[in-house]
Image: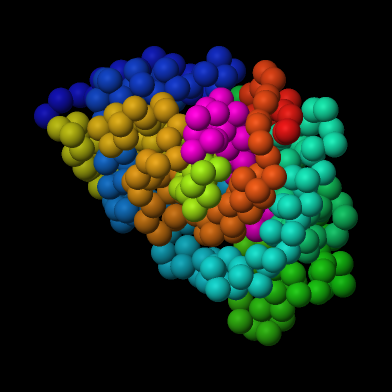
């Protein structure tokens, strides 16, 4: 057996976040398992090894947290992404029903109508921000209403989501500020949420009803509420921004997509693969395990490098290239195994609706210089000046 090769880098510093892709390539070149001394964690860098670990939830557990440091693991422990069975199953049973394809069909017309109106409205502007004016709009208009929070909650959802993903990294300045923001969210859920303050028929109201009917353990209710609030916006906004950016950078792919509109869903998956909204989560080993001839001890924290795995040269030919015809079945932008993203179908529906409207109405996509969002875990643009014609 051999020791894991060492990679010296702080994965959560500003310089890394601004341009991580060459660093991921360096990690993969070292091997599928590496050691990160800055974080005292192992990391899985390639697609096959990350996929095996994600599906091996008994050997790579989530219940002891999924952040990169102990504080983050402890602070957010117990939510859906940071839980094991049977708790994980109990939480998914609450969250999954309204997010399944059959249930989402009821809101497809609303999503399509909102997307059409949005895309058409952008033509009258000399320039718009593809993040704040486009990527955020559909999740804000549709998803915030489905969740059903009162005004204070709606106004702070994006801040709270960003905070949760910052804590899921390490407790640098971003992580420390995030704790204060999340504490406000937790107090709001304790003191400001009841059947009179939330929207009737909303996802949060359904949780309250389940508790009142004795069908849900009250201890699980706030975790389910947080899980509807925190992951539902940032990841989709990130992926929509990446989609616009890639289409603008690759006009040949945009022309191909307009000629082959039935490739829209595949183009969406390609944007998710390249952008990988969640860069990485960790797992903890429950037993000694050997991967690619490297011994990983029991109790070790192992980073699942989704963003690196999605550009693995062994799986994706020309992995840095945006290709709407690519076979994307092995991308890990939505995870894999029991923790696969529960909101995947809603995100795909939102993104596809925007793209189909663009195919119908947009001729060319122009953009200016984007600005990277500084978040420990989410890969996204904070601004992306754009223009449709």
Q: Position of residue 85 (x, y in %)?
A: 41, 64
Residue 105 versus residue 152 in the image, above or below: below
Q: Quadrant of the C terminus?
A: top right
Q: Position of residue 265 (x, y in %)?
A: 50, 51
In-front residue for pair 177/240: 240
In the visual, does 33 lie left or right of 216?
left
Residue drawn at point x = 19 percent, y = 39 percent: 290
Q: Position of residue 214 (x, y in %)?
A: 64, 83
Q: Position of residue 172 (x, y in %)?
A: 61, 25
Numbered-mark total: 0
Q: Quadrant of residue 222?
A: bottom right
Identify the magenta region: 227-256
Q: Main secondary structure of the magenta part?
A: helix
Q: Is 119 a magenta residue?
A: no
Residue drawn at point x = 51 percent, y = 44 percent: 259
Q: Which residue ends up furthest to the bottom in the rendered image?
A: 213
């Amino acid at each position: 057996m051999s020791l894991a090769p060492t990679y010296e880098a702080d994965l959560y510093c500003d310089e890394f976040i601004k341009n991580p892709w060459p660093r991921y390539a360096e990690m993969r070149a070292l091997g599928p398992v590496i050691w990160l001394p800055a974080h005292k964690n192992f990391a899985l860098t390639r697609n096959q090894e990350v996929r095996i670990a994600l599906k091996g939830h008994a050997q790579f557990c989530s219940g002891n947290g999924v952040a990169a440091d102990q504080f983050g693991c402890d602070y957010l422990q117990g939510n859906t992404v940071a839980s094991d069975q049977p708790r994980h199953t109990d939480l998914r049973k609450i969250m999954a029903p309204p997010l399944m394809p059959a249930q989402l069909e009821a809101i497809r017309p609303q999503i399509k109508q909102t997307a059409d109106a949005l895309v058409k409205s952008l033509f009258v502007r000399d320039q718009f921000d593809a993040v704040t004016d486009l990527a955020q709009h559909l999740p804000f208009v549709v998803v915030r209403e489905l969740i059903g929070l009162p005004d204070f909650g709606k106004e702070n959802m994006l801040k709270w989501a960003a905070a949760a993903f910052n804590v899921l990294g390490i407790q640098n300045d971003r992580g420390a500020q995030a704790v204060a923001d999340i504490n406000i969210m937790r107090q709001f859920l304790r003191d400001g949420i009841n059947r009179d303050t939330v929207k009737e028929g909303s996802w949060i109201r359904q949780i309250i009803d389940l508790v009142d009917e004795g069908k849900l353990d009250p201890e699980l209710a706030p975790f389910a509420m947080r899980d509807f609030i925190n992951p539902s916006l940032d990841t989709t906004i990130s992926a929509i921004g990446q989609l616009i950016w890639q289409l603008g950078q690759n006009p040949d792919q945009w022309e191909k997509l307009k000629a082959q509109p039935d490739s829209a869903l595949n183009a969406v998956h390609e944007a998710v693969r390249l952008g990988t909204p969640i860069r990485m989560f960790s797992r903890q080993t429950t037993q000694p395990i050997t991967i690619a001839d490297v011994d990983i001890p029991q109790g070790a924290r192992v980073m699942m490098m989704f963003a690196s795995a999605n550009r693995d040269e062994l799986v994706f030919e020309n992995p840095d290239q945006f290709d709407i015809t690519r076979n994307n079945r092995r991308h890990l932008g939505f995870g894999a195994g029991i923790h696969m993203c529960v909101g995947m179908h809603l995100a795909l529906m939102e993104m596809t609706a925007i793209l189909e409207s663009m195919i119908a109405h947009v001729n060319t996509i122009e953009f200016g210089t984007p600005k990277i969002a500084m978040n420990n875990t989410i890969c996204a643009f904070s601004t992306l000046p754009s223009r449709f014609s």
